[in-house]
Image (cartoon, rainbow, N blue to C red):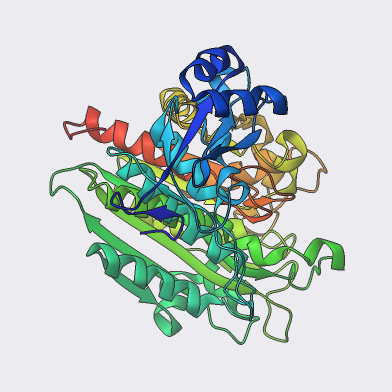
Amino acid sequence: MLECLAEPSVDSLPLHAVTPAGLEALLEGLPASQAGFLRASGFAAKAQEIRLLPGEAGLGGAVLGLGADAAEAARPWAFGGAAFALPEGTAWHLVGAPDPAAAVLGWCLGAYRFRRLKSEGARAPARLVAPAGTEAAQQQAAAIRRGRDLINMPANHLGPAELAEAVRDLGARHGASVEVIEGAALAEGFPAVQAVGGGSPRAPRVAILRWDGAADGPLVALCGKGVCFDTGGLDLKPAAAMLRMKKDMGGAAAVMAAAEMLMAARAPIRLLLLIGAVENAVSGTAFRPLDVIRTRKGLTVEIGNTDAEGRLVLADLLALACESAPALLVDCATLTGAARVALGPDLPALFTDDDSLAESVVRAGEAVSDPLWRLPLQKNYLSWLDSSIADLNNVSTKPMAGAIVAALFLRHFVERDARWAHIDLYAWNDQSRPGRPEGGEIQAARAIFRAAETLAGGAGGAGR
């Protein structure tokens, strides 16, 4: 159980959730002393507004404002600030939450802080007695929090070996098989991954997790870019651009979180999780601009820029995934700054040439407050990746449409009949907001989870 949750047997105080429209009815139902206190304090049920209520023994409860927007009131973030706004050591139960599962998710995500490397203890969050029927929300919160831990961990504590070990731990928790490829086998089977990681003393790895929730279920393949630190390689990033590059494995963390959600929910699918764990470093063995490297698919790639390394890692993973003919193939990566310029930090870019899949993923994201926005795979930009000496270049010489060009590069490594989606995400909160503290963030995982379960339901499984 997460530290921000309490057992049902614990004595707890009521946390009344209320909109401005419902405030008068709440006041009429409260004891006169509490209603009078709320009126006197000017409580207006604005979003994130909290008032503690007096009681005979001191504290008798609290009221949380949800704001006037009914849709926002039902999202997780409406409850994302409560765990640290309420007194430490107190326990609470919800009264009037529009969506109890969303409230529990928001509470647990807002209670998260990365404290693993601090020598002194921090203030503990208030605890919530989660309502019955919110177990899935608790599982999703736990998966997201573990993913946030991975992104927040400094690169000297989380290299390729440690990221691969995290996949092993994930498999062990859910009875999945995990294989880690390294050394000569990696160089032979994943030459692009080896090329990217060859400049680091911390050797690259590919972690492969397999799990059968249903022997005859559809195969869902998830691929994650796990660049544990990205210097840019010999095309070195400026210092300011390197500051957050411990988060360049955010795509790996996102698909690991999605995989954990699917396994915890016992989704009726077969799952293939592929993580390319590398460090893009500078040394005498680093790959160079204008090198030509081989990929697992057999295509050769001219290196126009060593800082466009994530797409090379994904190229080998996508090729391996396609060898198993998945019913759904999704990759996640912190791939381009261009996607952030286009959509900002909170809206991952979705690329697919399958209209029905795009609709399904976008709809899933909207349903669970995990939004994405589709950008086009503009086919006439394909020629921008032409190379005079190799099958293709890893970058375009044109300073435009960077996110689209990166997605088009990946398209070369996906079989034409595959149902494939590429998600370019930021994996970071630049400042703290309710439910989303500053630091690493897991984006798109809940949308992937919902879309994969929908696929399983349509394939004859018990979709939820």
Residue 151 horizontal/vertical position (percent): 59, 63
273 with respect to 249 (left or right): left
Q: Nearer the viewer, residue 73 or 22?
A: 22
> Total label count?
0
Residue 243 horizontal/vertical position (percent): 78, 66
Q: At 32% across and 54% down in the image, what residue appears?
A: 7
178 with respect to 421 (left or right): left
* The N terminus - image quarter: bottom left
Residue 74 horizontal/vertical position (percent): 50, 26
Q: Is residue 404 above or below residue 374?
A: below
The answer to whether one can see residue 240 in this image is yes
The answer to whether one can see residue 45 in this image is no
Q: Quadrant of residue 174?
A: bottom left
Q: Residue furthest left?
A: 215
Q: Nearer the viewer, residue 101 or 304?
A: 101
Q: At 44% across and 61% down in the image, what residue appears?
A: 3
Q: Residue furthest front?
A: 56
265 with respect to 251 (left or right): left
* The C terminus - image quarter: top left
Q: Quadrant of residue 66?
A: top right
Residue 375 horizontal/vertical position (percent): 62, 30
Q: Is residue 455 above or below residue 271?
A: above
Q: Is residue 453 above or below residue 35?
A: below
Q: Nearer the viewer, residue 248 or 85?
A: 85
